[in-house]
Image: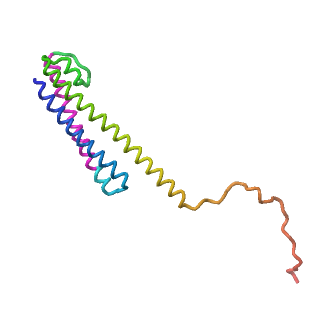
Amino acid sequence: MSVQQIVSILEKLEKMHKSLLELSLKKTELVKKGDMEELDQMLKNEQSHVAAIGTLEQQRQALVRDYLNAKGIAHADTPSVLDVIEAAETNEERNQLTDVRNRLMSVIDDLKKQNDLNQKLVFQSLQFVNMTLDMLRPQPTQINYSGKEVRGQNPTRTNFDSQA
């Protein structure tokens, strides 16, 4: 089994994560604009990217597991690329794997930062909407004792005799 297959799948993962990062950057602008229809479409597009990344990740895990099994190396339940780097035969393979792994980790880190920003923007927008709704709703009258009512007061008598 060749390291090139693992490098190839890592490059595909890097490409998909970069594409997801671009979508995340566009989503930031859509949240700022408040364009809900475009945002909904963007979320659907993101979901398809995430599904594709999940499939590629499963393939990567299978390739890494097969590579380590072929080398006769014991591995954890989810072997990592770092395990393959340590098991690689040549420095060229190690350098190639390390390079693509570092690039992928960098893109993932950028994606996490962008998603955190988007989450904060959405939360801020939600707070603004709630504040606006609170301002537009009529305020309920006070239900508790206000101190203005007096208990035990007799009804006032009038000079009008209703029986006459």
- Give the colour scheme shown: rainbow
Closer-to-camera residue (19/1): 19
Could you say where residue 61 lies in the image, as x and y percent from the top left?
Answer: 21, 28
The quadrant of the image that shows the N terminus is top left
| Residue lying at 32% horizontally and 53% vertically, measured from the top left | 39
Question: Which is more toward the observer, 107 or 149?
Answer: 107
Instruction: From the viewer's perspective, tell me whether residue 150 is left or right of residue 137.
Output: right
Q: Residue at x 26, y 35 (%)?
A: 107
Quarter of the picture containing the C terminus is bottom right
Query: Which quarter of the picture shows residue 119?
Result: top left
Q: Residue 158 sits in which quadrant?
A: bottom right
Give the residue furthest to the bottom: 164
Does the magenta run of residues contain 48?
A: yes
SS assignment for the magenta stretch, majority: helix
- Residue range highlighted in magenta: 44-71
| Image location (x, y in percent) of residue 51 | 24, 41
Q: Give the image location of residue 113, x and y in percent.
A: 35, 38
**Looking at the image, residue 30 lies above or below residue 104:** below
